[in-house]
């Protein structure tokens, strides 16, 4: 099993990352079915590098801290940083030789990002076009079978399967198994606080790193039913961020809250207060662990160094097969 996350915007993870991916990584890790690799995709976050370079090193440490706080156990999972394992770069280069340009140009995330970048009068980099090829290298380097990701990564998984197949066919060697996407359906159910998709770039997220007070403040500003002004006004839970998050975080009892809201038997203030308590309680153990790790960055560095060492071993085995298949 392999999966990764980009250390964007300071590297702090939010509840969308947690519920849509991290919890599944921890579940798979504890089930013990797979040899497991989880990494910080720091090279990927350079694909949309802008005028202001952020401190990726610091951001990668923050992402790692959130991995560990959420329950990733370095004794069971190799936790590492992409740029520490140079084999990712070599495999990316070699895979780029068997990837038709048309395939990468058609990837929907590329088309979206290309538009965004040109709106800001910036240039689209060659690296951005190659984003899914680098991601394919990440996956195939460990000959991963299971790749748990959010729905937004489905197209990338699809192209990685195609590249794996094409490599095997062109070289007449079965080097790579086709990776299976484990798509989390939760991602779509977890809206951002303003009702759009939860995303750092929209600033509509709840971070694991927030204090309980900051969480309360963020939830207080969340989008509810615009026409529900008085407690007795009927709400529309299906369109309300607070209600939708309640369903995710309180699956056994959300129904009562939804019906009371619908029938004007409760106000949004009460619903926000209750949701805050539920989310803060759910994040409490993760936040406590985060604070311990923040106080011991030496330990986090050590985890990354050991993780990279384990990753390099498997990566080098794969590359030996790849070089041979290409008659290098
Ligand atoms: N593209 C993924 C994201 O933005 C991060 C990522 C990079 C990844 N390489 C990967 C995820 C390999 C799974 C497997 O979330």
Image: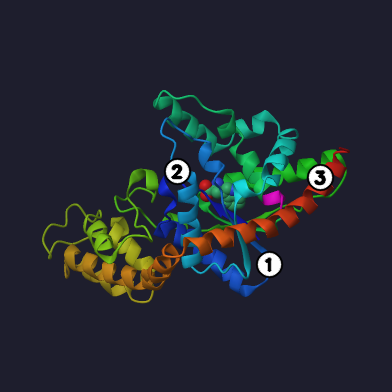
What distance separates the C-alpha of mark 3 from that of mark 2? 34 Å
Q: Secondary structure at mark 1?
A: loop
Element type where label 2 sits in the image: loop
> Residue 231: where, in percent of width, then height?
12, 65
**What mark, if any, has residue 256 been given in the picture?**
none
- Front-most of residues 87 and 58: 58
Is the N terminus in the top left, top right, bottom left or bottom right quadrant? Answer: bottom right
| Dot placed on the residue nearer the N-terminal end, 3 or 2 | 2
The residue identified by callout 3 is 322
Q: Nearer the viewer, mark 1 or mark 2?
A: 2
Report whether residue 147 is seen.
no
Residue 243 visible in the snapshot: yes
Residue that appears at 34% across and 63% down = 245
Looking at the image, which is closer to me, 125 or 226?
Answer: 125
Check whether the beta carbons of the residues at disc 1 and disc 3 lie within 8 A of each other: no
Q: Does residue 61 show up magenta in the picture?
A: no
Q: Tell me the residue at 62%/49% (across/down).
A: 84
Q: Is residue 310 above or below residue 201?
A: below
Residue at 55% of width from left, 28% of height from top? 125
Instruction: From the viewer's perspective, tell me whether residue 112 is left or right of residue 243.
Output: right
Q: Main secondary structure of the magenta part?
A: loop
Mark 2 crowd level (few <14, some 14–19, many ≥20, 10 Å Cα): few
Residue designated by label 2: 55
Tell me which segment is drawn in magenta. Answer: 139-143
Q: CA distance from mark 1 to mark 3?
A: 22 Å
């Amino acid at each position: 099993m392999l999966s990764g996350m980009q250390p964007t915007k300071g590297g702090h993870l939010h509840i969308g990352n947690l519920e849509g991916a991290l919890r599944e990584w921890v579940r798979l890790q504890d089930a013990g079915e797979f040899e497991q690799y989880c990494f910080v995709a720091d090279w990927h976050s350079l694909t949309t590098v802008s005028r202001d370079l952020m401190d990726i090193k610091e951001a990668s440490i923050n992402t790692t801290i959130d991995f560990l706080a959420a329950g990733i156990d370095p004794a069971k999972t190799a936790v590492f940083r992409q740029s520490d394992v140079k084999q990712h770069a070599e495999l990316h280069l070699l895979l780029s030789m068997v990837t038709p340009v048309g395939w990468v140009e058609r990837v929907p995330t590329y088309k979206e990002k290309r538009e965004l970048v040109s709106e800001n009068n910036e240039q689209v980099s060659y690296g951005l076009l190659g984003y899914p090829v680098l991601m394919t290298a990440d996956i195939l380097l460990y000959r991963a079978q299971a790749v748990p990701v959010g729905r937004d990564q489905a197209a990338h998984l699809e192209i990685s399967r195609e590249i794996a197949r094409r490599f095997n066919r062109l070289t007449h060697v079965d080097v790579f198994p086709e990776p299976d996407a484990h798509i989390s359906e939760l991602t779509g159910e977890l809206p951002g606080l303003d009702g759009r998709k939860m995303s750092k770039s929209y600033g509509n997220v709840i971070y694991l790193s927030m204090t309980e007070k900051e969480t309360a403040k963020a939830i207080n500003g969340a989008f509810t039913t615009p026409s529900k002004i008085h407690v007795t006004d009927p709400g529309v839970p299906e369109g309300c961020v607070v209600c939708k998050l309640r369903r995710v975080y309180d699956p056994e009892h959300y129904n009562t809250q939804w019906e009371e809201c619908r029938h004007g038997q409760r106000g949004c203030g009460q619903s926000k207060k209750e949701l805050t308590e539920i989310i803060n309680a759910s994040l409490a153990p993760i936040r406590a662990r985060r604070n311990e790790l923040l106080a011991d960055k030496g330990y986090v560095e050590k985890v990354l160094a050991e993780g990279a060492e384990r990753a390099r071993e498997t990566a080098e085995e794969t590359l030996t097969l790849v070089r041979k298949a290409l008659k290098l």
